[in-house]
Image (tube, helix red, strand yellow):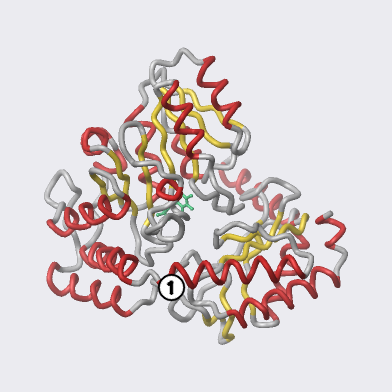
Amino acid sequence: MSWKSRLEQLRQERVEQRLWRNRVAIASPQGRFVTVAGQSLLNFCSNDYLGLANHPELAKAGTTAINQWGSGSGASHLVCGHHELHEELETKLASFVGAEKALVFSTGYMANLALPQTFLGRHGLLLEDKLNHASLLDAGQLVTAKMKRYPHLDVRSAERMLAESEAPQKMVTTDGVFSMDGDLAPVVELREICNRHDALLVVDEAHGLGVVGEHGGGVCQQSGISITDNVLLMGTLGKSAGSFGAFVAGDQFLIDSLVQFARPYIYTTALPPAVVGTSLAAVEVMKTEPWRRKKLQSNIQHFCALAESHGLSPNNSAIPIQPIMVGSADNAIRISDELKSKGIWVVAIRPPTVPAGSARLRVTLTSEHEHEDIERLIECMAGLLIGSHSQEVIL
Ligand SMILES: *Cc1c(COP(=O)(O)O)cnc(C)c1O
């Protein structure tokens, strides 16, 4: 089949399954309300958990950095694109998560690609939670090491796989907070089995950073796990930090190895000064405005209590990701469309992003929401779910 016929066939399949995706362009900054095609929508989709994506301090820091250092970094880190500003950010990030060192990457996707290829040889073993983020799973495709997926959160299966393997190097990677379900990885137990089997543990804190842990350090901080020895943390700066980019934090020896061997670090242009300056301000604001984390927690609690009283089953965790299961992709899209006509934006998540039959409305809460916003959302959602027959699908 030619490349073109293949694409035509794939396209037709997607359209028939009603899974063809369309992008929605927003005409405003990120925030509690966003403008789409002239309509103002109450926004329950963003990962901007702390409302920093349009924070004046961040915007100012980005502008100052561009005025002082110019628009481009000029080269990759090992040529001449590594600025003092990058080092300053690395120092701040390491201290924020309590690690010896941190290394800034252009994106979280690239940081995740870098890990197995740096730490595993050709006969190594990479274990992944079945519901890990696509970037962690894709990382396994780039190495000759063997990748195996264990059932979601199943530490026993993971340990069995480690025990049965004769691979010379072993590594376990997991989302800290799972991006589609909002549940938490059992990091304490994972650390134990990694210790027992001389494996490296990588925790992807894309959704935990800034949100969970006493100082917003993530799931590891919340569980009392220090980022040292055989534990690495990957954090992103495009979600709760309201900026862009990512970092890996851990002991100096591991970070040094990434600088030497991680191709997604070496063969790409260093982040531009505006982004680095913005991220520096983001870390500062996360430290100096802890009220944002507290307000987010209060919003999550309000959502969970209200959802429960309306017969929707919330996650009941302290996590801003709250999936409301609706079964079929059609149902998810229909409810999402109806919410939109009422001025509320909740994205429908459907296969292949999540397994077939587990389409959902993925509500994300931020510190920008007011309790009345949440009340409006729940009332509309409960009305639509009960009005349709989707309750049966849930049960
Ligand atoms: C968003 C996300 C990433 C990718 O980070 P980017 O900086 O957006 O490339 C990695 N892991 C998880 C769990 C994510 O949710």
Residue 378, compared with residue 117, is above or below; it is below
Residue at horizontal 25%, vertical 46%?
A: 103
Q: Secondary structure at mark 1?
A: loop
Left or right for 345, reference 242: right
Quadrant location of the N terminus?
Answer: top right
Residue 268, compared with residue 300, is above or below; it is above
Q: Residue furthest top?
A: 166
Q: How packed is label 1: few (under 14 Cα within 10 Å), some, or many (20 or more)?
A: many
**Residue 273 found in image quarter:** bottom left
Quadrant location of the C terminus?
Answer: bottom right
Image coordinates for residue 146, horizontal then vertical, percent: 48, 23
Q: Nearer the viewer, residue 187 or 368?
A: 187
Image coordinates for residue 113, horizontal then vertical, percent: 39, 40
Residue at the disc numbered 1: 51
Image coordinates for residue 294, horizontal then vertical, percent: 46, 69
Q: Nearer the viewer, residue 38 or 306?
A: 306
Residue at horizontal 59%, vertical 50%?
A: 183
Left or right for 89, reference 378: left
Residue at horizontal 47%, vertical 44%?
A: 135
Residue 27, compared with residue 95, is above or below; it is below
